[in-house]
Image: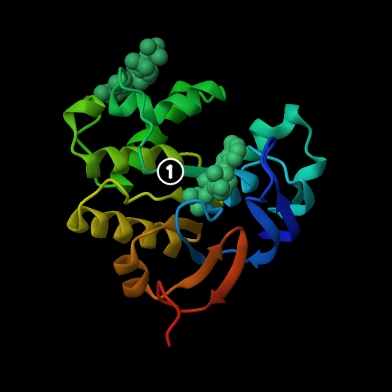
């Protein structure tokens, strides 16, 4: 589903690679935590999967496609297979919940009929039925993140990428978001989540990939946040 072969990323104007010789494979249906200190390269990994950045060397395959062979014209089509969620939600502040979730579908030209089925469906999945007409500022942080997850889900993506999705939420709210991501994963979506939250990683016991200074130092099935001594 995702394959990195000897991927190195050096940002323009920097000396030290943000990712350094990373090779890994993530299979369909996996739930993977990416852990590591701030600046270790987690977001860079996610941006490379999205083809928002290109590797300095090495090759990346996602969903059977060589990202190096996808023309910039085709990138938007490729990205329809990927749902993305961020720490800061990134909702459109002057649009309703419904319109936030509908927005990408409108951009890609889906019919009104399709949108009026798919949006309520996604909002039901995240437990926000009845909040269609609210604006983001009228919602709690946890509810805003659920809107962002609904927006990521509405295209039925094969892969969901989450960059510190619980970073702005209290522990109880975070637990609810994790239950939701686990359910999405159980329904077949591959989930890759970058996080600093040791409590969550220790509780879920999923695959853990630990990055330090751009290198993978641990790739463990059913692992915790830190290496067990
Ligand atoms: P993490 O997500 O683990 O915090 P990042 O992938 O954001 O790590 O960053 C990895 C390294 O790359 C850091 O040293 C960071 O400063 C650097 N970096 C990230 N984005 C850029 C950029 N656009 N330009 C230059 N350096 C960057
Ligand atoms: P526009 O992009 O034209 O400004 P909006 O972004 O406000 O329109 O809304 C996008 C779509 O979502 C429209 O089809 C609108 O009818 C629909 N919509 C907005 N809010 C709701 C709601 N609470 N319930 C159902 N449909 C809604």
Which residue is depicted at the point 46% across and 56% down? 194
The answer to whether residue 210 shows anywhere in this view is: yes
**Where does ligand 2 appear, by image quarter?**
top left
Q: Is 23 placed left or right of 171 in the picture?
A: right
Residue located farthest toward the right when viewing the structure as drawn = 69
Residue 223 is left or right of residue 122, and the answer is right
Q: Position of residue 122 (x, y in %)?
A: 37, 41
Disc 1 target residue: 85
| Among the 4 quarters of the image, the one containing residue 120 | top left
Q: Which quadrant, please, contains the C terminus? A: bottom left
> Splitting the image into 4 quarters, where does residue 101 fall?
top left
Q: How is the image coloured?
A: rainbow
- Left/right placement of residue 38 relative to residue 198 reads right
Depth check: give the residue in front, 191 or 51: 51
Quadrant of the rendering where the N terminus is positioned: bottom right
Q: Secondary structure at mark 1?
A: strand
Q: Residue at x 34, y 74 (%)?
A: 202
Compared with 8, 211 (above or below) is below
Q: In the orientation shown, which residue stands out farthest toward the bottom?
A: 229
Image check: 86 left or right of 189?
A: left
Above/below status of 36 relative to 137: below
x and y percentages locating residue 15 in the rendered image: 69, 45
x, y percent for residue 12: 70, 36
């Amino acid at each position: 589903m995702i394959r990195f072969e000897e991927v190195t990323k050096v940002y323009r104007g920097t000396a030290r690679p943000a990712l350094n010789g990373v090779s890994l494979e993530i299979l369909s249906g996996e739930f993977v935590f990416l852990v590591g200190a701030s600046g270790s390269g987690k977001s860079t990994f996610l941006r490379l999967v999205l083809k928002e950045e290109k590797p300095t060397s090495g090759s990346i395959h996602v969903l059977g496609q060589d990202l190096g062979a996808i023309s910039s014209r085709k990138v938007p089509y490729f990205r329809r297979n990927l749902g993305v969620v961020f720490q800061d939600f990134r909702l459109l502040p002057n649009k309703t919940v419904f319109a936030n979730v509908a927005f990408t579908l409108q951009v890609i030209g889906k019919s009104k009929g399709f949108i009026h089925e798919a949006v309520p469906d996604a909002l039901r999945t995240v437990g926000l039925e009845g909040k269609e007409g609210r604006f983001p500022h009228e919602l709690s942080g946890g509810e805003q993140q659920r809107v962002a997850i609904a927006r990521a889900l509405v295209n039925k993506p094969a892969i969901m990428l989450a960059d510190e999705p619980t970073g702005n939420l209290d522990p109880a709210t975070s637990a609810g978001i994790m239950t939701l991501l686990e359910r999405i994963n159980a329904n077949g979506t591959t989930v890759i989540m970058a996080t600093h939250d040791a409590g969550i990683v220790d509780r879920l016991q999923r695959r853990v990939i630990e990055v330090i200074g751009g290198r993978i130092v641990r790739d463990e099935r059913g692992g915790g946040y830190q290496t067990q001594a």
